[in-house]
Image: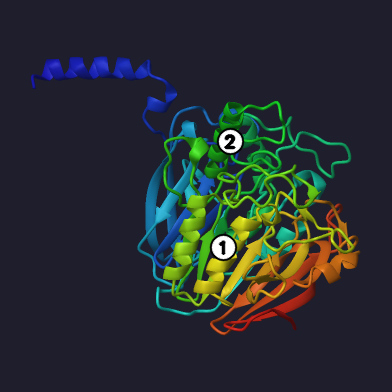
């Protein structure tokens, strides 16, 4: 090409780029007056050779674009075997874009199985905090697992003291089972108020995640080890079901628009490896994560595909209209097939359902010939629940553990091959973890649960304090320690082990240690 023609074309190209929107400009290396890594770092969805590393550039988190100028920015990452980063084993570069809130999801590969690493990010003249990552064991290894289990962190209702303790538990992996944020606007009596009104738009949800991510206890827990995360209802709207809102005046189109905003913001703020969708409103987060040959985690979504709750969202006397309809499903029929067929194919020692709402029924109507069940949980979908329990009975009996959040209290439940008859055999155990802060301090009282124990023989234990669960898993047994803090409405709460339970591989039931 002739030199003058080349220079003329280059000048016209530069003029064209100057008129383009910010998202089309060249990336740059910014200089920051404030820490762009104020929201911390995280890792998630580990494999034997890698994981997802996450951060988000947000030097002023409550401003538009997190205080970023609008141009794309270069973010470098590195993974090392030593705290001083003298032995860097992998490094890479990502482009953080305003369209995705300057979030970074680096899918690292090429690491060794069953190893601890450290990682960090750089952008311009700024360096992030350091996070710790453990890769999963090799596919044929039955390496023991120390698993943390948590859910339900309402910023307004309490401090994240439980997460501060969880960060020090030296877990290999943490499973967060939903209600990572709460959508509500400022409410009376808040321990620390939400920023802004109830979340509706993409900017609303981004701001809400920013507020939660600024919490130092949450940052410490994320930096301590990799997480696997799923969502429940409050990441969008309380008790929503598919395209149905708890607000009867909201149309399906409005719910989908809100869902798209909420799902995008969730993805932007979590260390997840999920497939791309044609629409953010249809983001599919179902996935499996293997811990070698010891455990396969089935990460479920019990909100997006469910039929609407029958007879209202709360506790209802049953039978009621549509309650027992076999066509109704909590996870959706496609997800049921994905799970039940997968259980038959998996050879892992333990099958682990990482999901949201309580699977065991709880009848709180004391007295004969009366049954009252909670419709927002699996009890509102008995045919769907019993199909899955039947598949567990056939394909993975007494090597399946269901991990549950949502209900803001601890429960230990034995799951039967179905709950339509009382003599069905026990085929799995459900561990329900209490909230991290939702519900405030809680109490030691059993409340309405104790009088109903006789009608719920599958229920083995319950409490209503805040906390988390630590599970030590090997190829022979699963030990679950229920850790509790006495208060979350003021700082400084200690942690204690309230009770400990054992599940023996291949043997029905769960026993207190």
Labels 2, 1: front one: 1
The numbered mark at residue 259 is 2
Q: Where is residue 49 in the image (x, y as percent from the top left)?
A: 39, 65
Residue beneath label 1, please?
A: 388
Asked if residue 85 shows in the view, the reply is no
Quick check: 134 above or below 14?
below
- Residue at (80%, 34%) from the top-left corner? 186
Location of the N terminus by quadrant is top left
The numbered mark at residue 486 is none
Please give left or right for residue 199 compared with residue 15 in the image. Answer: right
Please give left or right for residue 405 compared with residue 98 in the image. Answer: right
Q: In which quarter of the image is residue 141?
A: bottom left
Quick check: 6 above or below 119?
above
In the image, 507 versus 174, the foreground residue is 507
- Residue at (22%, 19%) from the top-left corner? 10
What is the spatial separation of the Cα atoms under label 2 and label 1, in whole angstroms?
27 Å
Location of the C terminus by quadrant is bottom right
The earlier-in-sequence mark between 2 and 1 is 2
Q: Outermost residue, left direction?
A: 2
Q: Position of residue 362 (x, y in %)?
A: 77, 61
In the image, 152 versus 80, the foreground residue is 152
Q: Outermost residue, front direction?
A: 369
Please give left or right for residue 495 compared with residue 293 in the image. Answer: right
Q: Position of residue 232 (x, y in %)?
A: 64, 48
For the image, the number of numbered tags is 2
In the image, 29 versus 75, the foreground residue is 75
Q: Where is residue 271 in the image (x, y as percent from the top left)?
A: 52, 52
């Amino acid at each position: 090409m002739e030199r003058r023609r080349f220079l003329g074309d280059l000048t016209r190209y530069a003029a064209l780029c100057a008129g383009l929107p910010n998202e089309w400009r060249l990336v740059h290396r910014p200089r920051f007056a404030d820490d762009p890594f104020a929201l911390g770092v995280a890792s998630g969805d580990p494999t034997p050779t890698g994981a997802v590393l996450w951060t988000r550039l947000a030097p002023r988190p409550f401003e538009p674009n997190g205080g970023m100028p609008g141009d794309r920015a270069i973010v470098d990452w590195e993974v090392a075997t030593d705290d001083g980063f003298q032995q860097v084993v992998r490094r890479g570069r990502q482009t953080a874009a305003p369209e995705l809130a300057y979030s970074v999801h680096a899918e690292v590969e090429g690491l060794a199985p069953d190893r601890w690493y450290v990682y960090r990010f750089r952008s311009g003249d700024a360096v992030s905090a350091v996070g710790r990552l453990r890769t999963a064991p090799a596919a044929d290894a039955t390496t023991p697992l120390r698993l943390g289990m948590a859910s339900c962190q309402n910023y307004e209702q309490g401090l994240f003291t439980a997460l501060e303790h969880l960060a020090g538990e030296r877990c290999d992996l943490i499973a967060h089972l939903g209600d990572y944020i709460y959508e509500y606007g400022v409410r009376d009596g808040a321990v620390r108020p939400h920023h802004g009104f109830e979340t509706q738009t993409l900017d609303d949800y981004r701001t809400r995640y920013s507020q939660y991510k600024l919490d130092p206890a949450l940052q410490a827990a994320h930096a301590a080890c990799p997480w696997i995360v799923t969502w429940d209802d409050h990441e969008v709207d309380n008790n929503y079901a598919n395209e149905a809102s708890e607000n009867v005046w909201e149309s399906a189109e409005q719910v989908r628009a809100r869902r798209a905003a909420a799902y995008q913001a969730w993805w932007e703020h979590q260390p997840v490896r999920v497939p791309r969708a044609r629409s953010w409103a249809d983001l599919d987060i179902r996935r499996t994560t293997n811990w070698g040959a010891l455990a396969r985690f089935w990460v479920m979504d019990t909100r997006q595909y469910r039929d609407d709750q029958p007879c209202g969202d709360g506790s209802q006397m049953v039978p009621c209209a549509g309650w027992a309809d076999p066509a109704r499903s909590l996870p959706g029929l496609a997800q049921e097939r994905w799970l039940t067929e997968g259980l038959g194919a998996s050879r892992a020692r333990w099958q682990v359902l990482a999901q949201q709402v309580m699977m065991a029924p709880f009848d709180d109507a004391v007295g004969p010939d009366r049954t009252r069940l909670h419709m927002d949980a699996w009890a509102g979908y008995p045919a769907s629940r019993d199909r899955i329990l039947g598949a567990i009975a056939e394909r993975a009996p007494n090597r399946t553990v269901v991990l549950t959040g949502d209900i803001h209290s601890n429960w230990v439940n034995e799951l039967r091959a179905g709950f339509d008859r009382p003599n069905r055999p026990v085929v799995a155990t459900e561990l329900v973890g209490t909230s991290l802060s939702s519900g405030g301090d809680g109490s030691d009282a059993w409340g309405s649960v104790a009088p109903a124990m006789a009608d719920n023989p599958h229920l083995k234990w319950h409490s209503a304090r805040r906390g988390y669960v630590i599970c030590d898993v090997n190829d022979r047994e699963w030990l679950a320690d229920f850790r509790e803090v006495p208060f979350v409405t003021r700082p400084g709460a200690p942690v204690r082990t309230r009770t400990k339970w054992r599940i023996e591989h291949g043997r029905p039931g769960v026993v207190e240690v």
